[in-house]
Image (tube, rainbow, N blue to C red):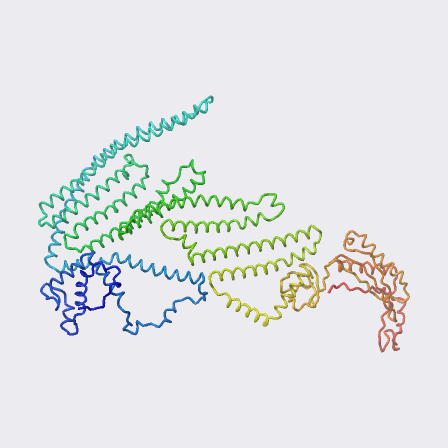
Amino acid sequence: MSVFPVRGPSFPRAGRRPCRMMPILLLLLGTLCLPSASGRAADAAAAPPSSSQSSPPGMTAQQAQQVLGVLNDPQKRAEFTNTLNAITKGLPQTAPATPSAAKPPAAASTGKSDVALEPDSVGSDVLDELSTMRNGIVHQARQFAALFADLAFVGHWFRTELSDPDSRNALFDAFGRAGLIILLAMAAERGLSIALRRPLNSITARAVDAEHRLNQRAAQVQAEDDTPTPAGETQAERTVQDTRRQDDRKQVETLRIIRRIPFSLLHLLTKLLPVALFLGIGYAGATLLGGSEQAELVTLTLANAYAAARGIYLLVETVMVPKSPTIRLCSASDRTARIVTRWWNVLVAMPSIVVCLSTLGGLFHLAPRGTEALIRALVLAEHLMIAVFIWRIRHQVAAALHPPARFQKSSFWQFVGRLAQLWWLPAMVFDLALWLVWATQVRGGYTWIWRTAVMTVVVIVISRMLALLLFGVQNRLFHISDDVETRYPGLRARADYYYPYARRALSALLIFATGVVLLQSWGIPAVAFFLHGDLGTRIVAAILSVMVAFTVAIVVWEAANAALQNQINRYESSEQVSRAIRLRTVLPIIRTVLLTVIVIIVAVTTLSQIGLNVAPLLTGAGIMGAAIAFGSQSLVKDFITGFFMLVENAMQVGDWVTAGGVSGTVEHLSIRTLRLRTVTGDVHIIPFSSVTSIANTSRDYNVVIVSFMLDLSESPDRVAGILAKVVTEMRADAQFAPMILSDFTFLGVENADGNGAKFLGSFRTTPGSKWKVWREYYRRLGLRMVAEGVKFPIPTAISLMSNFGSSPLLIGQAPSAPPANANTPPASPQSDPSHE
């Protein structure tokens, strides 16, 4: 009878023994397919198994025994599992029965990222590889957990042993007797240890005396070493003396160790006596009080395990001896000795427990799978404790591995010293790898570990040597000589600025290359992945493209800044100060625009190399830019007008200008606004879009315009001479001479009518000195005109009544003369000192 259609190709692994496994398989399938619809069958399935319960229908006791033998035998169980896997692969796939299991395909895509990645790009491929790695890690984690899945057999064995009265009584009797005997033996051991304290103290005292005598000899040798050498001693004689002193010191240290050995052996033998007493009492108790064979075997097993662990601990304690430094056989400190012995006491306990389990598991009918799983867990705990112990003593071991002081100047030994600080990392990995190879029973695993450890050290040393070589070359490339610094000022400062970043980039490349080579040495085809694989070559190309983009961006940025600075220096050296100032004014704007363009290009290049689709990003940026341009036309006008005004050097900070109907001193210039402070102290912030013209008073020179009305009877030549003479006097004054650039220029009479004649003249001043010179000039001119008796026209007014009588005053008629006793001063000249 055939239950399922079985074909040859469906059994790739279990096809070797199909005839022997098929009856068992059919028997198990028939057992699983028994009818269970009735209530009695359900009750029978829920009831606990018992010896009086009959076998299920269609299954004999012999068949059940055969199935049980298959489950208990690891090899047969593996073959049975392979057969089931082969049948599962050969069966047709059916639709899931429950609606909840049938999920729509869209549900699988809900976990994807919202970032749009281009297909067949580096980003999408990396995400796929990460997903594959995650699945692999989950699979490996499940396989790791499967190593401890058989711990369920321990719980099942424990419940079975406690549920059966005979097994429970035998278990309690064996461990009860064994525990009582072990406690008595440990009490005897403790009592003998207390009694042996005096002999141990005597051994320590003798060791102290021997150490004291040896220290005296060492002091003599040290005194001889400190003796100054004679003045006439040659170099050869001095070398011979140093060699002899070094030999004497080594001889003292050797004698120190040799003299400690007898005391250490006596210390060990004295401490082994309580262990021997414990072992004797344990054997005697097992023979006399054991009772059953199981109790005797349990007692002997526990006694042997304890004695072995105690003996191994005493061997290490003999070397360390935390309480007696004078008989210590190693050069460890007291703190290190205490740490090592304390941890060693804990570490040796776990192997003894493993020995007990391996011996007693089969004695009390524990399934081999449960015993193996329990031993795996205990050994894993042991390795974890060893890892913690390695972490605990990492500083002490690093100090011991550190090279001597005479080698500190060498770069190689400095690297060895840094590497010694990290010795605990490979030690932990090595410790856990040993357990993993042992637990998984990997063939050639230990060979692979040793080969990997050696290759790791070799690769790290070669990588460090190569790093020293490359760092030296990089240091030379970034070293700017004095001649080059003289030709290109500021180049050394820029090189020093970029040197840390270049060093970090080189370090990252070296770390990446070292990691690839390490993976290759560990058996992982990393070189083939990055040189021949599709994803690896894309990753390398993307990294190189991004690095080239950043390098080109930095070169363009520095070249543009250097070119602008050189141009400013040329303008300043060629006395083109105005151009230099104009270029220096717009230099921040040019740098900002250039930096923005470089950042955008590098960002777009990087995102495109990662795999992000930058077309929507650029389209959105363009639309947003257009919207901003249309919505803020005045802002764009501010920027454009301000840029060209700054480029054309229309004004500078400190100039006195008139812009937008406001006159004041320029305090700040930006790409968008102009800030003026008037004479009243008010600050006016004017956008460049409101500036149609600029009147700059602080450029080149100013002109003082002299304009006033004189009587028609005055001679123009005489008045022009007076005006010119005042300017000449001011140019002779040391205070005003630097401010006046030219003599007075008489421009003539502009107008003459009934009100008088209007005289015009001018002279030049330096920028910004106009109003100071103007006020001083009119002050002096007024005094000179009074002294010269210059006549000014009398203003003509319209009045119905005369000021000196009741007769009407006609237009153009002068008033009558004042009384004779009236003292009327001459009119002062008109002036406008305001510079508004």
Please tell me which residue lies in front, 619 or 826.
619
Residue lying farthest top? 232
Q: Position of residue 500 (x, y in %)?
A: 51, 49
* Residue 113 as seen in the image, left or right of residue 325: right
Q: Position of residue 387 (x, y in %)?
A: 31, 49
* Residue 431 as seen in the image, left or right of residue 698: left
Q: Residue at x 52, y 62 (%)?
A: 604
Q: Position of residue 756 (x, y in %)?
A: 87, 68
Q: Is residue 266 above or below residue 641?
A: above
User: On the image, which quarter does residue 662 sit in?
Assistant: bottom right
* Residue 668 as seen in the image, left or right of residue 816: left
Q: Is residue 244 above or below residue 75?
A: above
User: On the image, which quarter does residue 306 sit in?
Assistant: top left
Please tell me which residue lies in front, 803 or 527.
527
Q: Position of residue 479 (x, y in %)?
A: 55, 45
Q: Residue at x 24, y 42 (%)?
A: 313
Tell me the quadrant of the picture where the C terminus can be found. bottom right
Please tell me which residue lies in front, 187 or 230.
230
User: On the image, which quarter does residue 229 sit in?
Assistant: top left
Tell me the quadrant of the picture where the N terminus can be found. bottom left
Please tell me which residue lies in front, 775 or 643.
643
